[in-house]
Amino acid sequence: MASEESSFSTPWERRSGFDLQSFMNRSPLARWLLAPALVGLGSGIDLLLQTYDIRRPTPEILLAAIVITVWYGGAGPGLLASVLSVSSLAYFFLPPSNSFEVGRPDLLYFISYVCFALLTDWFSSVRRRTERALKQARADLEVKVAERTAELEGRNQTLQLEIAERRRVEEELRRSEAYLAQAQRLSQTGSWAWNASTGMVTLSQEALRIYGLDASQASCAPEVLLDEVLREDRAALEHYVTSAVRERLDFEIDYRIALSDGAVRYLHSVGRSAVNGSREITELIGTTIDVTDRKLAEQDLQEAKSELAHVARVQAVGELTASIAHEINQPLAAVVANADACTRLLAGSTLDMHELREAVGDIAEAGTRAGEVIARVRAFIRKAPLAARRRVDVNRVIEEVLELTKSELERHEVSVRCELDSGIPDVQGDRAELQQVVLNLVMNGIEAMQCDTGRARVLEISSETDADRKAVQVTIRDSGIGIPAESYDRIFDPFFTTKSDGLGLGLAISRSILESHGGRLWAPDTNGSSGAAFRFTLPASGPETL
Amino acid sequence: MSQDAPVVFVVDDEKLVRRALERLIRAAGFEVRSFASAQDFLRAERPDAPACLVLDVRLPDLSGMDLQQELIRTGDELPIVFVTGHGDIPMTVRAMKAGAVEFLTKPFRDQDLLGAIEQGIKRHRADRQHRREVLALRHCYESLTAREREVFPLVTSGLLNKQIAVQLGTSEKTIKVHRGQVMHKMQAASLADLVRIGEKLGIRRSNPASGLSQRFRYNHSRPLLFKEGSS
């Protein structure tokens, strides 16, 4: 309160920090003592002035004592001060001195003084009360204002906080939007939403970029997007999405689009349908990723792999030179021997036309045979163009490889036991690459049986299909030394080899070839029987593909 | 079948090659018999005639090399001309060491093959002749008595009757009779003839049953020292 009352304090009080008023308010005794003290002081000063004859006694000082007492002590002490000052006047200053008697000549003056003192007391009291009331009112007002101010300030603060919060949230939202846009840009993932009621698709900035559309098409009809899809992918996409909408299922699909500049993009879209309470579709929300770079990288990788496979194939043929030479020399020997026989027959006295005709027929057959061997080798080492996938009969592949390795098998005294299921479905693949896999496994088998194990060298090859004809499985088992346990986990690693002259790529390449065909290659447990086994599967080509 | 009409056997699993070889060899004037596998050849009955085997190295199951070993094991002296689509040096060396006539790589010139066949037949003919002779001599040898068989190596060693008599602890006269019997039964015209016959039959070496010949051979190298000590 002191601070609010300070405006009504004397300058001295303000300076000294001592609040006489409040002190008086607190102590009633001080209030009452104030009256005799001030009146005594006033009387003392007057007496002093009178004693030294400076001037005649003045009652103003006593009046001032009343005013001050009323001001600080209130009405009661004021009245006491009035009585005391009147008494003091009558006693000290009005003749006869030092007696309360008042002489007749001074009676009027005395009465007027008493009246004056009472008036002073009264005015001062009224004034003090007014002042007090005013002060109280001001103080109340002050309190109210302070309360209001505090309230306002509080509200203001809340508002400020709210504003700051909102600004922060807005900032965060903006940042998160920027992040999202950035993330979409970086991951080349656009988002979109199709609204069932309006039938329009809303696209994110990145989605617009992916589809090569400008910002004005941020909300467009689905046909705008569908028009960009490559003709060969369009029907499948349409069918897939409409059925997903009908079944209220999520969908995921790969397709390609052609931009206006002719560039083709590979896209991967994932969609999810949002349904309302009555299981009606309200929205289709999804993302579209531009996987062109990845697809192209995959293609590059595939090309590199096929290049490597080709190199390995050429190398494999290199290893087979002896056998191939044998395969070609065999019919050549027949040609030469038949020709020599013909020469001798023609030199004879009688011509055995039947024998000659047969000899010439055999020459032609042998020539064709040699040509076939060369064609087979050429077909095997030819560089397979990508996507040269067509229907392949795996049994035929196995037979071709066995033809190619026939003399190799004979040379190493390996007998082959074939159990090929003629009912297996075709697979979709590259003939040369699949031949390479089989050749690699056959050659590995031959090599594994080189160490003398005392067992017959038998290479078992079997082909079969699973119950629902979804895949073809081929197993190649040898009776050789088997796979050492310590290298079992590493045999498919590139550059891992147990041979002194091997590159260690055969199995790695074989596995990569099979994987690129959607198949698998592994070494099944031989259950303790001797030798090693390798098994691969290939998915059967569907009836719809040609 | 004429004793001297030679036969050529061809074993090759490749039908085209087999037929071509058959045709060529027949055109060269030989009688040909061909087989698709080594087993077929082993099972077949062979005529008693000079022959030669044209054999492919690589055959299913029993290879050409295996067949060669099998023939050696059974004491068959049939000469072999190997033919192969791709022969390596170790294989050639192995075949030749085991007594093959020739090792030809397909395709080959007809004169090489026919020359080798002729060489093979010649060798077989000589072998057959030799064997026939040995057989006849063995027959004669079997007619000798135990004593005469004892006398035989001592005679061919060049000992005098007297020395032989001392060796066997009998009289010189008896030895003379035995010697005459040996010469007669072995149809030897002279001592030199008998020595040659002895060599053909391997008497000096292949008669371990007689401890005498062993001992004598030892004495022969140092006759003076052991003359008295033996009995």
Image: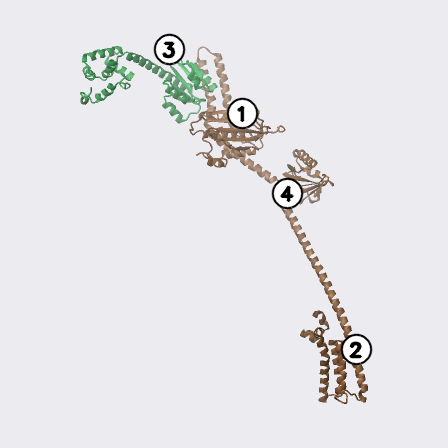
Chain colours: A brown, B green
Query: Quick check: A517 above or below B228?
Result: below
- Is there one chain holding both mark 3 and mark 2? no
Residue A303, percent across and down?
Answer: 55, 35
Going 69% across and 42% down the picture, which residue do you hit? A193
Instruction: Report whether mark 4 lies on the same chain as mark 3.
Output: no
Q: Are marks 4 and 2 in contact (CB under 8 Å)?
A: no
Three-letter code, disc 4:
Thr
Q: Which residue is mark 1?
A: A420
Is residue A403 rendered to the left or right of residue A93?
left
Which amino acid type is marked by label 2? Trp
User: Are the residues flagged by discs 3 and 2 in contact, CB closer than 8 Å?
Assistant: no
Place of residue B138 in the rendered image (x, y in percent of width and height, measured from the top left): 30, 13
Query: Local crowd at mark 2 within 10 Å, few (<14), some, or many (≥20)?
Result: some
Q: Decide which of B43, B101 is in the foreground and name it.
A: B43
Among numbered discs 2 and 1, the one appearing first in the sequence: 2
Amino acid residing under circle 1: Leu
Identify the residue position indicated by label 2 in the image.
Answer: A122
Q: Are marks 2 and 1 on the same chain?
A: yes
Nearer mark to the viewer, of 4 and 1: 1
Q: Residue at x 45, y 10 (%)?
A: A350
* Chain name for mark 3: B
The residue beneath circle 3 is B3
Query: What residue is shown with label 4?
Result: A189
Spatial CA span between label 4 and label 3 = 96 Å
- Chain for numbered disc 2: A
Residue nearest the observer in this picture, B231 or A319: B231
Residues behind callouts 3 and 1 on a single chain: no
